Structures are given as structure tokens and as C-alpha cells.
Amino acid sequence: MVNFFVGQKATFSRTVTETDIVMFAGLSGDYNPVHVDQEYAGNTRFGQRIAHGLLTTSFLSRLLGMELPGKGSVFLEQTLKFLKPVFIGDTITASAEILEIDSDRRILRLETICRKQDNTVVLQGEAKMMMPKEGKKI
């Protein structure tokens, strides 16, 4: 297995745009007005439209699939706890840290967190990722 170690970290940042929300609504079919209708959302406790929780979660998919552990790895599990809303214009930094390595089963357990630009935690959880067998084409 590639030389991973407990405590190894990676991050990925992206600013949430109007286009992201519209495209995610179209892709997922989730047209909840709290995401897509400014007038409706303005009358909620958020006071404005919020990003889909799974849009924010998708930043973890990018981070884990492309950075740590990276290409060829696949999700086995992901827990999620949504703590704060994400708004259009927020820059989200997804981070992952290896908590445990099961070399025999080729599985990594990672802490996953998404933070806003002011360091507010908006999402936290844990992931389990399976690594490809060495020597296999990916």
C-alpha cells in the first residue's frame, strides 16, 4: 500500500456559486425551495438560500477520490453531521485526516470536516476508504 500514515492530512477548497446550486438541483432533482427560491428562503430561519448539504459533501468526494487517499480508492462508508448552513459565496475547505490504517484489508479510516472561510465547521464525519490492490491499473 502507498506509504500512508496516521495523522496524514489533505485539503481542498472551493467557493459555492449560484451555478453550483442550480446544477446540483438539476442533477439530484432536489428543488427544495430553501435551495432554489430566494423569496421562499428569505422567509426561513436562514434568511437566504442555502446550498444542498450533499453539494458540500461532494467536496469530500473530490478530496478523498483525488487527493487522500486518491485515485483508485472507493468509499465504503461516510458519516455526516451538518452543523451550519452554507451560502452562495462561501468558500468551503474540505479536509481529511487519516485516523486508522488497516493494511491487511486495505482500508483507511479518516476524519472528514468542511469549514467556511471564517473557520466555522459546517460539516463533520468519518469516512472509510478502500484502496486498490497494488499493481492494478487505475
Image: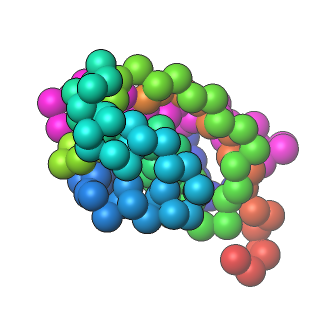
Of 13 and 86, the residue lying toward us: 86
Spot occupied by residue 93 in the image (x, y as percentages of width and height): 30, 43
| Residue 127: quadrant of the picture | top right
Write the residue at 59% across / 56% down: 29
Write the residue at 27% across / 58% down: 18
Tell me the magenta residue range. 95-122
Write the residue at 77% across / 75% down: 135
Of 42 and 136, the residue lying toward us: 42
Give the quadrant of the C terminus: bottom right
Residue ranking furthest to the bottom: 137
Residue ranking furthest to the right: 105
Of 135 and 43, the residue lying toward us: 43
Q: How many marks?
A: 0
Secondary structure character of the magenta stretch overall: strand
Spot occupied by residue 24 in the image (x, y as percentages of width and height): 47, 58
Spot occupied by residue 85 in the image (x, y as percentages of width and height): 33, 29
| Residue 7 appears in the figure | no
| Residue 101 appears in the figure | yes
Q: Is residue 76 above or below residue 18?
A: above
Spot occupied by residue 30 in the image (x, y as percentages of width and height): 55, 49
| Residue 49: quadrant of the picture | top left
Residue ranking furthest to the front: 39
Q: Is residue 120 located in the magenta-colored stretch of the structure?
A: yes
User: Position of 124 compared to 94: left or right?
Assistant: right
